[in-house]
Image (cartoon, rainbow, N blue to C red):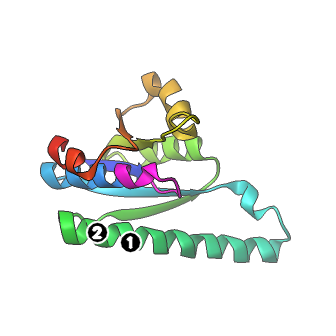
Amino acid sequence: MRKFLVVLDDSRECLNAMRFAAMRASNTGGGVAILAVIPPDEFNHWIGVGDIMREEARERIEAHFEVFAKWMRDKQGVDPELVIREGDAVPEIIAQITDDQEIGVLVLGAGIGNKGPGPLVTQLTKNAGTLPIPITIVPGEMSKERLEAIT
C-alpha cells in the first residue's frame, strides 16, 4: 500500500497537509503515516529531567495525533499510523522515507506570510532532486473546499 507521509508539528499549515494526505489516501486506497520529530535539544538537562521531558513530549504528540487520527478515521475512512523519531527534523524525515518503503509521497504544508514557506519546505525542496519520492506542497491558506476538489 502506498502511504502519504505527513509531518506533525504545531504549525497552522500542518492542518492542510493532514487534510490533503487523508483525502488523497482515501481517494486512492492508500494510507497515511504521521511523523513527529522531537528535537534533540529539548533534553539537554540532567538525565532524569530529560527522560521526564521526553515522555511529556511523546504524550503531547500522541494527544495531537489522536485529534487528526479521529478525523481521518471518521471522515475519510483512513486509519493513520504515528511514528515518533528523535533528532533533527530533515534527517529524520529522510530516514523515515528510507526505512519505510511503502511511503510514496511526502506531504508538506507551506507557511503563509512574510516568513516564507517554512523551514521544512525550504530545506527539503533543496534536496528534492535526490529524494526517492516526490514532495507535495500544500498551500497553508488553501480552503477545505478547494482541497476536496483537487484530491
Task: Give above or below for 129 relative to 10.
Answer: above
The local crowd at label 2, few if under 14, some if 14 to 19, many if 20 or more residues have their Cα within 10 Å, is some
Please tell me the numbered disc located at residue 113: none
Q: Which residues are magenta?
A: 7-17
Report the side of 118 relative to 24 (left or right). right
| Pointers 1 and 2 in contact (C-beta within 8 Å) | yes
Amino acid carrying mark 2 in the image: Trp
Residue 18 figure quarter: bottom left
Q: Which residue is mark 1?
A: 67
Image coordinates for residue 36, horizontal then vertical, percent: 51, 58
Task: Give above or below for 98 relative to 38.
Answer: above
Q: Which residue is mark 2?
A: 71
The local crowd at label 1, few if under 14, some if 14 to 19, many if 20 or more residues have their Cα within 10 Å, is few
Amino acid carrying mark 1 in the image: Val
Residue 55 figure quarter: bottom right
Q: Residue at x 67, y 70 (%)?
A: 54
Image coordinates for residue 27, horizontal then vertical, percent: 13, 51
- Residue 6 counted in the magenta span: no
In the depicted view, which residue is nearer to us: 138 or 33? 138
Task: Give above or below for 74 relative to 10.
Answer: below
Secondary structure beneath disc 2?
helix
Image coordinates for residue 130, horizontal then vertical, percent: 46, 24
Identify the image quadrant of the C terminus.
top left
Regarding residue 1, the answer to whether it shows in the image is no
Q: CA distance from mark 1 to mark 2?
A: 7 Å
| Furthest residue in direction top, as rendered | 129
Q: Residue at x 50, y 40 (%)?
A: 94
